[in-house]
Image: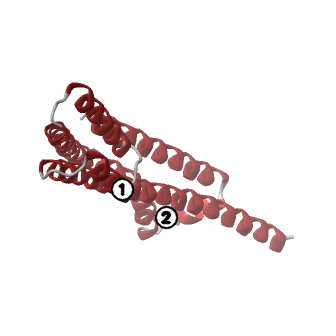
């Protein structure tokens, strides 16, 4: 009977540990993918700005607007800020067609505004990085507390994995950590978007 209880306790501890590990691995993966996507979007926007500048330079050199734009659009992605930039380029093309305004000049202005926006967002992201680093540090504190408990001989891992109260504490800590990280991420995103 005592052997059966030990097996059930070990299985429950394995389940608690598996859930904790799954939540932290999933959170890490989501954060990693979001950062990679953000970096890719930033690079795509800068590439699109370079393309708009190249189109303006080609137009000043006497190139046909339609062929200059077609070549650049085919090479670049068109999501997020890039899609908005291309909508503005299309609007500039319509304005140039209807009013006779020089298209190269309009595109140079769009490129300048885009670069200003890019710099403002980079600055806002840098400002928000401190808050995000603090949130990650606070999220790591419970793990440091468990390590400290183990270091002084309190057997905190056993308590967290082998008791109902410990499992509840571990679950509560995860909920608060993830809620805090999501909250800080939303705050940082709102700062960056408002820039």
Q: Quadrant of residue 101?
A: top left
Residue lying at 42% horizontally and 67% vertically, measured from the top left: 152
Looking at the image, can residue 181 be seen? yes
Rendered image: mark on residue 76: 1
* Residue 39 in view: no
Residue found at the very far right of the displayed protein: 1
In the displayed structure, 146 sits above or below 176; it is below
Residues at discs 1 and 2 in contact (Cβ within 8 Å): no
| Disc 2 crowd, CA 10 A, few/some/many (<14, 14-19, 20+) | few
Q: In which quarter of the image is the N terminus?
A: bottom right
For label 1, the SS is loop
Task: Please state the horizontal and vertical placement of residue 154, each as a whole percent of the image.
Answer: 49, 64
Measuring from the top left, give residue 13's x and y in whole percent: 67, 64
* Residue at image coords 51%, 48%: 173
Q: Is mark 2 on a helix, strand or loop?
A: loop
**Front position in the image: 144 or 138:** 138
Residue identifier under label 2: 154
Left or right: 184 with respect to 24?
left
Q: Report the quarter where the C terminus lies.
A: top left
Residue plotted at (27% across, 52% down): 68
Residue at 21% over, 45% down: 118
Marks 1 and 2, how far apart in space? 58 Å
**Residue 72 placement, left or right of 168:** left
Mark toward the start of the polypeptide (1 vs 2): 1
Residue 18's spot in the image, x, y percent? 63, 64
Front-most of residues 146 and 172:
172
In this rendering, position of residue 87 left or right of residue 161: left
Question: Disc 1 vs disc 2: which is toward the camera?
Answer: 1
Q: Residue 159 at what x, y percent from top left?
A: 58, 60
């Amino acid at each position: 009977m005592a052997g059966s209880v030990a097996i059930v306790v070990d299985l429950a501890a394995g389940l608690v540990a598996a859930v904790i590990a799954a939540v932290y691995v999933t959170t890490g993966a989501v954060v990693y993918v979001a950062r990679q996507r953000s970096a890719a979007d930033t690079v795509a926007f800068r590439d699109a700005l370079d393309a708009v500048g190249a189109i303006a330079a080609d137009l000043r050199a006497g190139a046909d607007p339609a062929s200059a734009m077609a070549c650049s659009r085919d090479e670049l992605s068109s999501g997020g800020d890039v899609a908005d930039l291309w909508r503005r380029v299309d609007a500039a093309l319509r304005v140039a067609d209807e009013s006779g305004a020089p298209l190269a000049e309009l595109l140079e202005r769009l490129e300048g505004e885009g670069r200003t926006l890019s710099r403002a967002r980079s600055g806002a992201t840098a400002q928000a990085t401190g808050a995000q680093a603090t949130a990650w540090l606070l999220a790591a504190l419970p793990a440091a507390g468990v390590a400290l408990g183990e270091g002084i001989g309190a057997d905190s891992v056993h308590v967290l994995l082998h008791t109902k109260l410990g499992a509840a504490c571990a679950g509560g800590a995860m909920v608060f950590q993830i809620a805090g990280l999501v909250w800080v991420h939303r705050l940082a995103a709102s700062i960056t978007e408002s820039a």
